[in-house]
Amino acid sequence: MTQTATRPAAPETPVKETLFRAGRADVDASMLQVDREGGRFGAGLIKGVSLIAVGEALGHELWIDEVTLSQVAEFAKASNEAGVKCRFTHPGMSSDGMGRLLGRIHDVQVSDDRATGDLHLAKLSHDTPEGDLGEYVASLCEEDARAAGLSIVFHHDFAAEEQFMLEHQVEHSHENHRGDIVTGMRFQSPDPNNVHNYPHVRLSELNAADVVDDPAANPDGMFDRQGLPREVTEFLSYAAGLSDTKPKTTSFGIDPDRASQFLGRFLESNGLSISPKEPTVATEKSEPTVAPTREDFAAELNKFNAKFGAENGSKWFTEGKSFAEALELHCEALSAELTAEKEARTEAEEKLSSLQLGELDPVETGATDSDSKKEKKTFAQHTKGQKS
């Protein structure tokens, strides 16, 4: 039986279901060549930039393989003379990429487990509302190539990703929430380096390759143009019970009260609580903890809802399930539904076969009572008699 789920409020700027922004791919300093006057536009050329590399898409629980790289190269080549758009950081939920175009990437090819190409800087990249971004990026590549990287923006091919997972299933036994041992099938990545069995990425469209920093290692770095939105702190503080002031923002797609209720139930069911951390004497300098941005929160929630539906997607997301764990729960739910449908169908067939059809022939005039009492047959017997 299908239940109607209440969908959370949509973000101010909805994120497309299949739209995805991959983690940055570090620039290979040994391959970079910067020519200030080169390129198709005569405004600069940076050769050998890396768009994406084989391995885990950090923070997304997805796996990049050789097929992913080849698809990136194929879509890049399909752009012909236009090339792949390259911008200075990703557009945000409340801002677009206007004034941040750096240029176009051409001649993308796959080698050494990565897809690389040449960035042709546009003349306008040297005269933007935010300054000479073209010169800034060129200088950064010469002075500190690892301070920045490229992050591709693409659309998922969910059908191809799911087909790949179905083709690589293995038997798996685990304990369910009732304590019973359940045997089923689960995805097993053919890549031995993918130890967490993350889904393998497949593309249906390539939109751009943007220059970004690494926010996990450098949250206040020179490429972090938007900083930490105030709305994120207000939302998380209210949801965690650290603030009584309800935030007005709806950009996350979840009502703050509902988020607070979800978090409260999760903490209570797991015997957890939130309390201030006791001060400790630091023995060495540690890296600061980075809170998720509004864009990360909304994109991750949208990813769960697009794959598992609004009800299960929101539930598993707020319970802190990883995408791989949610996939396993989704498969179990589908298997249970199929089993229930099969049992219902078998029961219906059995009932249909046992139906009494009554007398098959009319009683002839003048016949005795004993003659009029014809033998009744079931539907299955009647059908068998017609076939013979």
Image (cartoon, grey):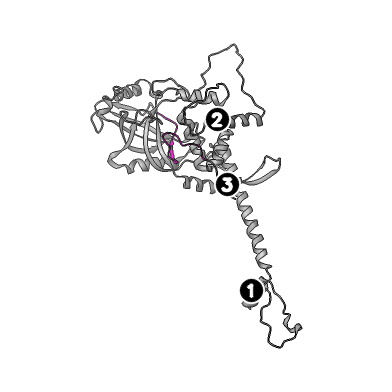
Q: Nearer the viewer, mark 1 or mark 2?
A: 2
Query: Distance between the Cα atoms at labels 1 and 2?
Result: 61 Å
Nearer the observer, 356 or 379: 356
Res 5 label = none
Instruction: Considering the whole magenta stretch, tell me its main secondary structure.
Output: loop
Amino acid type at circle 3 is Gln
Between disc 2 and disc 3, whose residue precedes?
A: 3
The residue pinned by badge 2 equals 257
Query: Is 168 situated above or below 116?
Result: below
Q: Quadrant of residue 124?
A: top left
In percent of the image, x 55 and y 22: which residue is there?
A: 244
Considering every residue shown, the one lying at the far front of the view is: 366
In percent of the image, x 49 and y 45: which residue is there?
A: 161
Query: Whole-percent x and y of residue 197?
Result: 55, 39
Amino acid type at circle 2 is Asp
The residue pinned by badge 3 equals 3
Amino acid type at circle 1 is Thr
Mark 3 surroundings: few (<14), some (14-19) or many (≥20) residues within 10 A: few
Q: Are marks 2 and 3 in contact (CB under 8 Å)?
A: no
Element under disc 2: helix
Mark 2 surroundings: few (<14), some (14-19) or many (≥20) residues within 10 A: some
The residue pinned by badge 1 equals 383
Where, quadrant-wise, is the C terminus in this rendering?
A: bottom right
Nearer the observer, 32 or 200: 200
